[in-house]
Every structure is written in structure tokens, then in C-alpha cells.
Amino acid sequence: MTASDRAASFQSLGYSGKDVHHVRVIVFPAIDVENGALVERHKIFIGALNGDYSTTMATDYIFMTGHLDWRFEEFTLGGRAWEGVAVFPLDGAVQTRFGDSDRKSVIMTNDCTKFYTHRYQMVMRNINTGELIATDPSTQSGNETPDLP
């Protein structure tokens, strides 16, 4: 069954045809070790387990932050400009865009035409200090790391 067949099945039951997930993004102070010394930074926490999300139908993931001092950043990766979140591989199945003019949200749309893992990188900036933080929430995907006994 194709993605459009699944959507048509759900639409026949009154479903709009697209799922929507609201994902909370939180920034916390954190410690890293750099050149043998502790350095205080910030880290991004994504609201569900380790940030892995899977779907079998067209889905909008709306990443949102309520932090007044932090916003999603536009950045270049892999020769392309991204709005808050970069997604690979570049196969057209997943698109991203800012959800609002204040860059407090990013909408990542997965049209489910490709059924395999897409990796994404998220970047945020502190609007007062200029500090940049990045995360790759899918590096320890349960799909590729065996469960511990």
C-alpha cells in the first residue's frame, strides 16, 4: 500500500490525510570537556526519548521552543541553506521551513514517499549572547543500535 493509498483510506474515515506532531524543544545549561577543562554551554533537549520519530503517513513535525532567549537558526550544511533543521539524505521526502517570523518554530514535513531513516541536525542561537548550539537527535537510533541485555 502506498502513502497515498494509506492517506485515502484514512480520509474515507474522515481523517484530513496528514498527521501533526508538536515537539517541544528545550535548552538547558550543560558541561562539556574542552582541552582538559570543563566548559559551560547549553544543549538542546527534544521532547521525546532521543529525538527519533517514525511515521508511515504524511506528517508535519512542528518543533517549538518557548524560550524567550533562543530561536532556531538558518545555517548552511551540505551546500544548502536550512531553516532550523537540516535533513539527509536529500531525496525530496522531507522538507523544513520556519513556522513563524520569530523563528520559535520549525515545521518538518515528511511526505512518506521514502521509508528509511532520515538524519536531521538542529541549530539554535541565543539572541542575547549569540551562542550557537547544535544537536543531532538521531545518532543513537534504536533502529541501528542493538538493545542492551
Image (spheres, grey):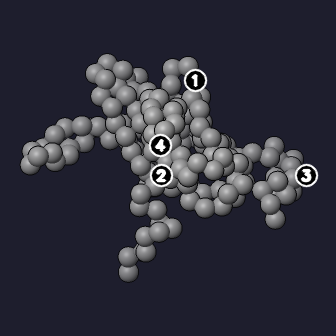
| Residue on which the image places disc 1 | 100
Query: Depth-wise, is mark 4 or mark 3 nearer the camera?
Result: 4
- Residue 70 horizontal side relative to residue 1, left or right: left
Counting residues from the start of the chain, the first of labels 4 and 3 encountered is: 3
Q: Residue 68: x percent and y percent?
A: 41, 23
| Amino acid at pointer 3 | Ser
Q: Amino acid at mark 4?
A: Gly
- Residue positioned 80% across, 46% down in the render: 17
Residue designated by label 2: 51
Mark 1 vs mark 4, CA separation in Å:
24 Å
Task: Tell me if residue 29 comes above or below residue 55 in the rendering.
Answer: above
Quarter of the rendering occupied by the C terminus? bottom left
- Where is residue 44, by image quadrant? top left
Q: Are marks 4 and 2 in contact (CB under 8 Å)?
A: no
Q: Residue at x 80, y 60 (%)?
A: 2
Crowd around label 1: few <14 · some 14–19 · many ≥20 (10 Å): few
**Residue bearing mark 3:** 12
